[in-house]
Image: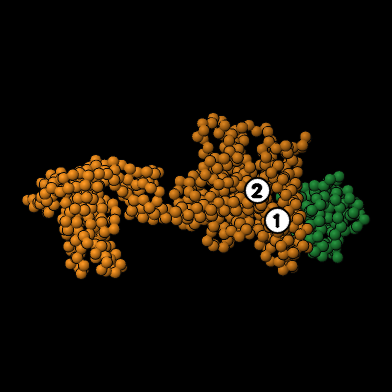
């Protein structure tokens, strides 16, 4: 069972998305901010990280940069979740080291497809 | 598109008007954007009630979360869209950062609503509670609608949070009319097209959809109109009990629709509840003055909605019943008036209805007639009462018909005597002539009636001309009666007349001599008058 780390500060969104992931057969770890996300990634060794970009303490951009700089965690694929719907955000996310990105509100089918693709690419 | 309200007649300054128009427009934009949010909250409310009703307690936490998010969103959008909002850029915050913050704040609750909604949809199918499905799908549709207008909300907010623009720029921005862009296309919802009772008139699909759903849940039959014009068309063809009318609509606004309704004989009494945003208070007052029954502020509070609609419908039902009673009362009154008119002269009925209690008028020139059936008492002893009354009825009815056709007032019958007056209550100069005519025809008619029956009735007539007092007195069973010496003399002339004869005093003969023939009877003694010369009226003169 692949494990996904969900880094999200909004309680309702965290609860909702984590439960949806569980329903779809994933194990879920959660973290409320970028700093906690960083340590959870190191301790929990998730197969994939869903990273909200607007986070307190350490935002998603910074957390992703650090994850990608850290040998222990750089291989874990990161999907950025942003509140933007503009194409420039994709470039910004890629520049920060994200493997993919998606927008809120989440289209679950689309997100699950992205997750699956990254997980399969990682397992090859 | 014309969003302007025609509230100009109080002569306010142009400057004020333009500000006012801008405010009205802003208020409308606000409503447009709030509508999907309100609809989401409304459907979530319904879902909670339904889930409770069905005992689906497992669904409740997520339904509550949807509600919570809807309320968050509602507060947020309301705050964002308030002109002069305190929600401004943080110090040093760039415009893109500000926009990003707004997007983030808006998308989080929307994300939660969408996510929980979709989860609930799965749970509902699992729980077999398919009745909840439609409302949930509507909720998700509204969430999609809101998402479609989200970028616009952000831009709109940024525009208002930025104070640098000149009035001109602001006006130009507003004139670009973003409403067209933010309005998602109408969903082709299938409403059961039953006979409608409550008509919902709103150009906003979200408002309309939620309202219809709420009304249906309350057991009403709801029909919808997208515009004022469409509403008027529907009202031309259908009967409804109540109208929920949006104030701000393009093309024809709520006030204009209201004025059309109040100008229509058929639709005037139809209760109208205005639907209005909170910032349109002045306009609401105008509508109440124009005859609207009540108003309902957006967003709709279910309880308030229920209360206002019930109150209106109750009033309408009472009003309908009242109209029914009034019609009944009118019919009863007409019946009683008709009865009264058969007893009293029409003119007198009018005066009694007008409030007069005692009617007593003096008439200087009238003619009174008495007619007595000779030997009636003897006949009465011979035949059965039923037969007697039948005969009497036949004779007096014939006399009634004669009097009516000549315009002579029948006063009453006293036993076997018949009393009539000419020249009252309407004064007429030919009162003596018309009475002479009646007297002759009475005798002729009686002769005719005698041909048909075995019993031979003979009549004795006396008449006299002079002043009388006529009127109605007493508390009940009143009749229009005549008093005075003229009446006494006429009565006495009849009493001492002869069978088949019409007796008059000489003074009356003089008045009629030119047109009628008389046989002098001679001098008789008349009680109260002494010895008087009388004549018998015999026939009309044949004039060539």
Q: Which residue is mark 2?
A: B299
Residue drawn at (72%, 45%) of the image: B76
Q: Which chain is green?
A: A
Residue drawn at (22%, 62%) of the image: B375
Q: Which chain is orange?
A: B
Q: Write down the quadrant of residue B84 in the picture.
A: top right
The relative height of residue B123 versus residue B271 in the rendered view (above or below) is below
- Left or right, B514 with respect to B193, comes to left
Residue drawn at (29%, 56%) of the image: B414
* Disc 1 from disc 2: Cα separation: 14 Å
Residue B168 in view in this figure: yes
Q: How many marks?
A: 2
Q: Nearer the viewer, residue B459 or B136?
A: B459
Dot 1 alpha-carbon crowd within 10 angstroms: few under 14, some 14 to 19, many 20 or more:
many
Between discs 1 and 2, the one toward the N terminus: 1
- Left or right, A9 with respect to B43, comes to right
Give the x, y percent position of residue B486. 23, 45
Q: Which residue is mark 1?
A: B44
Disc 1 with disc 2 on a shared chain? yes
- Which chain is home to disc 1? B
Q: Nearer the viewer, residue B417 or B367?
A: B417
Q: Nearer the viewer, residue B85 or B164?
A: B85
């Amino acid at each position: 069972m692949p494990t996904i780390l969900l880094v999200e500060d909004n309680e309702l969104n965290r609860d909702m998305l984590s439960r949806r992931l569980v329903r779809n057969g994933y194990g879920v770890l959660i973290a409320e901010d970028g700093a906690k996300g960083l340590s959870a990634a190191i301790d929990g060794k998730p197969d994939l990280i869903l990273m909200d970009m607007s986070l307190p303490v350490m935002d998603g951009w910074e957390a992703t940069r650090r994850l990608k700089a850290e040998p222990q965690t750089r291989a874990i694929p990161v999907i950025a979740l942003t509140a933007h719907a503009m194409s420039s955000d994709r470039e910004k996310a890629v520049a920060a080291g994200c493997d993919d990105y998606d927008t809120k509100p989440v289209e679950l089918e689309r997100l699950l497809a992205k997750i699956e693709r990254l997980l399969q690419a990682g397992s090859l | 598109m014309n969003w302007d309200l025609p509230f100009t007649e109080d002569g306010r300054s142009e400057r004020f008007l333009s500000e006012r128009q801008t405010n009205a427009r802003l208020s409308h934009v606000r409503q447009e954007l709030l509508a999907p949010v309100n609809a989401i909250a409304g459907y979530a409310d319904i879902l909670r009630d339904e889930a409770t009703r069905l005992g689906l307690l497992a669904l409740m936490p997520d339904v509550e979360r949807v509600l919570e998010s809807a309320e968050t969103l509602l507060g947020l959008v309301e705050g964002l869209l308030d002109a002069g909002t305190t929600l401004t850029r943080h110090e040093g915050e760039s415009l893109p950062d500000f926009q990003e913050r707004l997007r983030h704040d808006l998308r989080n609750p929307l994300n939660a609503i969408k996510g929980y909604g979709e989860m609930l949809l799965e749970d509902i199918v699992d729980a077999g509670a398919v009745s909840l499905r439609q409302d949930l799908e509507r909720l998700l549709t509204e969430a999609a609608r809101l998402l479609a207008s989200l970028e616009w909300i952000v831009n709109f907010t940024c525009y208002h949070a930025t104070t640098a623009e000149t009035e001109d720029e602001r006006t130009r921005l507003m004139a670009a009319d973003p409403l067209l862009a933010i309005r998602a296309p109408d969903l082709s919802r299938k409403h059961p097209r039953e006979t409608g009772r409550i008509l919902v008139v709103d150009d906003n699909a979200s408002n309309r959809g939620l309202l219809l759903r709420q009304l249906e849940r309350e057991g009403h039959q709801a029909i919808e109109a997208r515009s004022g014009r469409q509403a008027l068309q529907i009202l031309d063809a259908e009967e409804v009990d109540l109208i929920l009318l949006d104030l701000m609509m393009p093309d024809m606004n709520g006030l204009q629709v209201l004025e059309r309704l109040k100008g229509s004989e058929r639709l005037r009494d139809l209760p109208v509840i205005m639907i209005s945003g909170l910032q349109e208070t002045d306009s609401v007052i105008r509508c109440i003055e124009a005859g609207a029954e009540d108003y309902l502020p957006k967003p709709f509070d279910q309880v308030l909605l229920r209360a206002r609609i019930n109150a209106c419908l109750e009033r309408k039902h009472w009003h309908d019943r009242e109209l029914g009673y009034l019609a009944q009362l009118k019919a009863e009154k007409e019946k009683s008036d008709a009865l009264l008119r058969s007893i009293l002269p029409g003119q007198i009925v009018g005066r009694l209805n007008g409030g007069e209690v005692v009617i007593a008028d003096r008439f200087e020139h009238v003619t009174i007639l008495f007619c007595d059936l000779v030997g009636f008492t003897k006949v009465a002893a011979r035949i059965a009462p039923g037969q007697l009354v039948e005969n009497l009825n036949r004779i007096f009815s014939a006399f009634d018909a004669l009097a009516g056709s000549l315009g002579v007032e029948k006063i009453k019958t006293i036993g076997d005597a018949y009393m009539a007056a000419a020249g009252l209550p309407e004064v007429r100069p030919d009162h003596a002539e018309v009475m002479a005519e009646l007297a002759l025809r009475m005798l002729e008619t009686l002769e005719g009636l005698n041909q048909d029956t075995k019993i031979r009735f003979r009549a004795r007539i006396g008449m006299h001309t002079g002043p009388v007092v006529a009127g109605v007195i007493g508390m009940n069973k009143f009749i229009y009666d005549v008093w005075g010496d003229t009446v006494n003399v006429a009565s006495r002339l009849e009493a001492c007349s002869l069978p088949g004869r019409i007796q008059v005093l000489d003074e009356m003969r003089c008045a009629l001599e030119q047109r009628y023939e008389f046989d002098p009877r001679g001098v008789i003694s008349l009680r109260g008058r002494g010895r008087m010369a009388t004549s018998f009226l015999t026939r009309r003169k044949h004039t060539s």
